[in-house]
Amino acid sequence: MGRVVVISVKVPREMIEEVDKLIRAGLFSSRSEAIRRAIAMLIKEYFDGLDERVVKR
């Protein structure tokens, strides 16, 4: 992972409560870790299906 950038995101309380449950269950050490993993999964899901010419833009 390269340089870290801080962003501000509005998330419904219910979603954060679910993320907190995952943290308490030991699946993630923090909200940041859980959200980074979710973003990585989103990128992989969408980029895997994109044409290489579109990704290079």
Image (cartoon, rainbow, N blue to C red):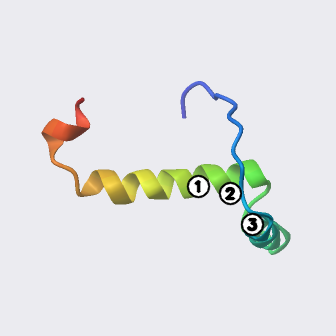
Is disc 3 surrounded by few (<14), some (14 to 19) or many (20+) residues within 10 Å?
A: some
Mark 1 and mark 2 in contact (Cβ < 8 Å)? yes
x and y percentages locating residue 27 in the rendered image: 72, 68
Mark number, residue 19 = 3
Mark 3 and mark 2 in contact (Cβ < 8 Å)? yes
Mark pair 2, 3: CA separation: 7 Å
x and y percentages locating residue 43 in the rendered image: 42, 51
SS under mark 3: helix
Q: Look at mark 2 in the image and give the residue it sits on.
A: 34
- Residue ID at (19%, 39%): 54
Q: Amino acid at mark 3?
A: Val
Mark number, residue 8 = none
Question: What count of labels does the image hold?
Answer: 3
Q: Amino acid at mark 2?
A: Ala
Q: Look at mark 1 in the image and give the residue it sits on.
A: 37
SS under mark 2: helix
